[in-house]
Image (cartoon, helix red, strand yellow):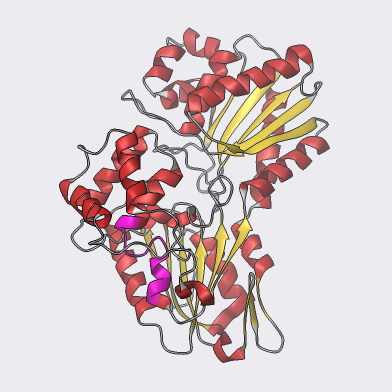
Amino acid sequence: MNRELTADLLSIRTAALQAVDPEQAVRRYLRAEPEGAIQAGKATWDTAVAGRLYLVAVGKAAAPMSKAAVEALGERIQGGIVVTKYGHAAGCSFPPQIRVFESGHPVPDAAGLAAAQTVSDLVAGLPAGSALLVLLSGGASALLPLPEPGLTLEELQSLTGLLLRSGATIQEINALRKHLDRLKGGKLVRLAAPRPTAALILSDVVGDPLDVIASGPTVADPTTFADCWQILERFGLGEAIPGSIATYLREGLAGRRAETPKPGDPLFAAVVNTIVGSNHLAAEAASAEAARLGYQPLVLSTFVEGEAREAGRLAAALVKGVRYESAPLSPPACLIWGGETTVTIHGQGIGGRNQELALSTALSIEGVADAAVMALATDGSDGPTEAAGAIVDGETAARARRLGFDPRRHLSENDSYHLLKSVGALMVTGPTGTNVNDLLVALVK
């Protein structure tokens, strides 16, 4: 592995993550005014509610976001609940009126169910004249499961697993979650109304669609039961899903189950949602650091989606274009993109979408000198592994073969993790405290 390129990629990684630090994001958008009012993103609350605030924070960045909120508002926060992924609350302490839960991701678990019921009880019981501050970040959909009546956590777990293995997009997965859960798809607002609600949102979805991030608990839902059924049919899951979920969706199609609240519903008159951090900010910071290091940077897109292995082939093609044709830039160059790919699982291996993308790239740039590629999950957790992604170069595949690995077989088996670990290509950061989609950075000397 080229040490200089690796060091530069790690420096770019640090700059990108610092730009979307969740504490700083909340501090930029949340403050108490000298006269007693509170500015929460695009919402302004007067002194009548400024001292009667309640907090609900959910997601992988929920703990640091809540820490910043407590520092900004202090005793104005009367009570609250923080729900984050296991291990992601470490290092954050809160006053006794704020309870902290840790739960499962990407598949919901019983701890998340208990947390979700506690959140539901808190919001439904908010006193008159109070206001609700919601802090949302990536992972919230899985971390806070509360099945609709007649459905069980185990059934939601089964459905989530089927959708993840099928290669469904986050938009498709969350459309189903919104219709099968009592807090998602604007339903948290149903519990809070008519109390004013402000949500500060760290986006982990391509394009920052408010109704998709965290399954939109504070946002009107444009999707329908019909959309949900079409998604299941598209992936051939209509016969595979639990029977009670199929029954529930059919009842929704027939109008016997209430739809999620839609755009224009007066429920949302007192709701203000504000994006406070996104993949675009991380990509721009990566670009600035690359320029400081002497590269010509180019942010290609922050809307990359599709199969991870296909994205890896595209990344390799771009690297070769720079290396051999000086297009779209002449070396030394840095190409950056952001987004969220998917993996359709066919094998029995272990890995994440960034590791699969990295292995695919490594195969396609084999033999290319003076180039390296970093595929990064900005939350520090790529798939069901401890890695945040990987850094590969033109020698990665050959090194793996010398150790007895077959890179193409590992790619076909969705087993990127073991190969990349063997050649020292994995990045292990631990929880980063943020989550704004993935970044891919390619350096060509």
Does any portion of residue 131 appear in the rendered image? Answer: yes
In magenta stretch: residue 188: yes
Would you place residue 72 above or below residue 372 in this image?
below
Q: Nearer the viewer, residue 392 or 442?
A: 442
Left or right of 164 in this view: 434: right
Would you place residue 298 above or below residue 24 in this image?
above
Q: Nearer the viewer, residue 178 or 140?
A: 178
Q: Nearer the viewer, residue 227 or 111?
A: 227
Q: Position of residue 13 (x, y in %)?
A: 65, 40
Q: Residue furthest bottom?
A: 48
Q: Residue furthest front?
A: 254
Look at 16% across and 47% down and name the residue there.
243
Does any portion of residue 405 appear in the rendered image? Answer: no
Quarter containing the C terminus:
top right
Numbered disc total: 0
Where is residue 84, by image quadrant? Answer: bottom left
Look at 42% across and 31% down and name the residue there.
343
Look at 48% across and 64% down and name the residue there.
263
Q: Position of residue 421 (x, y in %)?
A: 47, 25
Would you place residue 61 above or below residue 10 in this image?
below
Left or right of 189 in this view: 280: right
Q: Position of residue 115 (x, y in %)?
A: 33, 65
Would you place residue 49 above or below residue 442 in this image?
below
Q: Which residues are magenta?
A: 179-191
Q: Nearer the viewer, residue 268 or 12?
A: 268
Quarter containing the N terminus:
top right
Look at 77% across and 19% down and name the residue there.
327
Q: Position of residue 43 (x, y in %)?
A: 62, 75
In magenta stretch: residue 69: no
